[in-house]
Image (cartoon, rainbow, N blue to C red):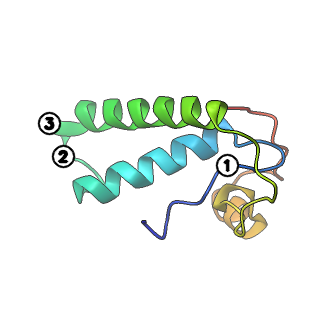
Amino acid sequence: MCRNITELRGLEPPATTDEVAAAALQYVRKVSGVRQPPPAAAAAFDAAVARVAQATAELLAELPARRQPPATVPPLRRPEVRERLGLGAFGGSERA
């Protein structure tokens, strides 16, 4: 498993669309070996990220609840990451 993809199942509050999209982006970057696609491949890259995010959201909605939350906190919930990205405090309002 890619170290950069955080487990999203069982979060409280549930994973947001931003968290699902970030995990999808990390996955597509990892399997493609491309951090930033060339202009000619940007549309295909973005479409792949959208499809992976959709599949991830559907999967998370269908899986049974966890007994315990994941051991790690997703990056978009960490104050130092949110500050670095210029985001406000995590509110968890955008649900996947």
Q: How many marks?
A: 3
Q: Residues within 10 Å of mark 1 (few under 14, many from 20)?
A: many
Q: Are marks 3 and 2 in contact (CB under 8 Å)?
A: yes
- Identify the residue at image location x=46%, y=45%: 24
Q: Are marks 2 and 1 in contact (CB under 8 Å)?
A: no
Task: Tell me: 39 left or right of 84.
Answer: left
Q: Which residue is mark 3?
A: 40
Residue 14 visible in this rendered orientation of the protein: yes
Q: Which residue is mark 2?
A: 38
Q: Earlier in the sequence, mark 2 or mark 1?
A: 1
Which is more toward the observer, 78 or 12? 12
- Horizontal and vertical percent position of residue 90: 81, 50
Q: Quadrant of residue 15?
A: top right
Q: CA distance from mark 3 to mark 2?
A: 5 Å
Which is more toward the observer, 91 or 69? 69
Q: Secondary structure at mark 1?
A: loop
Q: Quadrant of the N terminus?
A: bottom left
Image position of 32 with respect to 4: above or below:
above
Q: Secondary structure at mark 3?
A: helix
> What amino acid is at disc 1?
Arg
- Horizontal and vertical percent position of residue 73: 72, 64
Residue 35 visible in this rendered orientation of the protein: no
Task: Tell me: 48 left or right of 81.
Answer: left
Q: Which residue is mark 1?
A: 9
Q: CA distance from mark 3 to mark 1?
A: 34 Å
Q: Residues within 10 Å of mark 3 (few under 14, many from 20)?
A: few
Q: Earlier in the sequence, mark 3 or mark 1?
A: 1
